Image: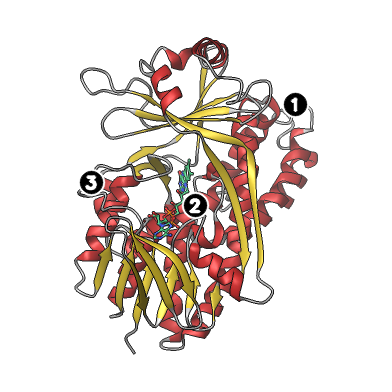
Amino acid sequence: MKKNISIVGSGLVGSLLSVYLAKRGHNVTMFERRPDMRSTKISAGRSINLALSDRGIRGLKAAGIDDDIMQIAIPMYGRQIHHQDGTQTFQPYGKENQAIYSVSRGGINMALMSLAEKFENVKIKFDQRCTDVDLRKATAKFHDEKTGENSTIQSDIVLGTDGAFSPVRLALQTSTDMFNYSQTYLEHAYKELVIPANADGSFRMEKNALHIWPRKSFMMIALPNIDGSFTCTLFLQLKGEESFETLKDEASQMNFMRNYFADAIELMPTLQHDFFNNPTSTLVTVRCFPWSFEDKACLVGDAAHAIVPFFGQGMNCGFEDCVVFDEMMEKHGDNWKALFEEYQTLRKPNGDAVAQLALDNFIEMRDKTADPKFLLRKKIEARIATEHPNFLSMYAQVTFSPQISYHTAYNEGQRHGVHLDKLANIENVFEKWNSDEVQSVVRELVR
Ligand SMILES: Cc1cc2nc3c(=O)[nH]c(=O)nc-3n(C[C@H](O)[C@H](O)[C@H](O)COP(=O)(O)OP(=O)(O)OC[C@H]3O[C@@H](n4cnc5c(N)ncnc54)[C@H](O)[C@@H]3O)c2cc1C
């Protein structure tokens, strides 16, 4: 039976989910708080660009939009590490040609909305801020940001793809018994800065890499854009000796940048302007359960599991949610309660796992990528991967292997860590590579 479905939020996940629902014949109306970014010059919110990897590509493929997106995506084959002494090293992400892709958030969101609107059973209503949801009745209240009018929309089902501060989730929280919820902020916040293109449009740094300036307790990263620029993101503590709080004036800010990011600042002509005009944004992890209410409402994407951005998986995980949601539509047909229940049971452990992976990867990126012990572990892992083609590192499982769940990848990563540490602690491990001492651990690892 065809349902009338309201989706709150036409961000990345809501727009993709609407395509899956439309393909199954449901009538979908998306309500988006912001104006239409295709006709109004507004920022797409949060980060300007994002790393898209295999899980996300799989989600786009099933909607038939992967080719369009890949045409405007820039492959990044590894991490380009900028050390404090000005030297650089390159750490590949995977085997030859394996890459993650830098894509424009606005570009991908606009492409998805336009694709959705090609279906006659999908409508998007902009400037509609959801203010309340009555889960039992499947009604949602909206405030029109332009006219100031309020309306109440009745549908069969309300889906919340309204991001980290989801009002649909709030309704679940206030009307469900035993709703588990936690919200944890990092002590670090982020600010976007820019390295513009050269006058001829060429890139000022290696184009096909994700650049990292690891500085132990903080870091900066940069992802390429198709116009030849890089969007840099500085992740720094909000308070403390070296923090956003203490970088209050131009002198202290320049001093800090010169100390830690000397090779970058000469590429950033608008640094001071960007630093003092761009917002400082916080980073939150949200865990909650259940994600659904009877056969009436369900959360998808960040609304169910907002995570910090350090594994580059939030959008990818949200797109994977859509794939699983679609599989559940196939399996359960008109039984929406069973559909929601199996969807949330399957996805919750993966949401938790990817949240933890993202938190762990912050420490890896900002601190360990410049640490000799970590680099030795990476070399050992790479050698094992060459000699045992079936072995997949945890990074490869998360990033290049959508057939492996986040949950499994996380557990495997913990197991690998124990064995890789053992190997890294063997003195001159590469000289003893074929010894039983080394090979017995390798055998355990690749088991
Ligand atoms: C700095 C940063 C970098 C990131 N980098 C990556 C990356 O490299 N790779 C990756 O995979 N992920 C990345 N992420 C995560 C990614 O941005 C999110 O996981 C993704 O945007 C989630 O999509 P969503 O549609 O669930 O939520 P959102 O993108 O937040 O979309 C929610 C939508 O709902 C709308 N909305 C909110 N409230 C209301 C309301 N009351 N009424 C109506 N509409 C409403 C919003 O306007 C928005 O359009 C990053 C995040 C950050 C912060």
Q: In this rendering, is residue 392 above or below 434?
A: below
Residue type for callout 1: Asn
Q: Which residue is mark 1?
A: 428
- With 46 as the anchor, is 83 left or right in this view? right
Q: Which residue is mark 2?
A: 314
* Residue sitting at x 41%, y 73%: 140
Residue type for callout 3: Thr
How many angstroms separate mark 1 from mark 2 (CA)?
39 Å
Q: Quadrant of residue 44?
A: top left
- Nearer-the-camera pick, 343 or 90: 343
Some atom of ligand 1 lies within 8 Å of the CB belonging to the residue at label 2: yes
Q: Quadrant of residue 50?
A: top left
How many angstroms separate mark 2 from mark 3 (CA)?
26 Å
Q: Nearer the viewer, mark 2 or mark 3?
A: 3
Q: Position of residue 95 (x, y in %)?
A: 47, 41
Label 2 with label 3: CB-CB less than 8 Å: no
Circle 2 crowding by C-alpha within 10 Å: few under 14, some 14–19, many from 20: many
- Whichever of labels 2 and 3 marks the residue nearer the N terminus, that label is 3
Circle 3 crowding by C-alpha within 10 Å: few under 14, some 14–19, many from 20: few
For label 3, the SS is: loop
* Residue 394, visible in the rendered structure: no
Q: In this rendering, is residue 218 above or below 266?
A: below
Label 1 with label 2: CB-CB less than 8 Å: no
Quarter that holds the N terminus: bottom left
Q: Position of residue 230 (x, y in %)?
A: 36, 29
- With 30 as the anchor, is 332 left or right in this view? right
Label placed on residue 40 = 3
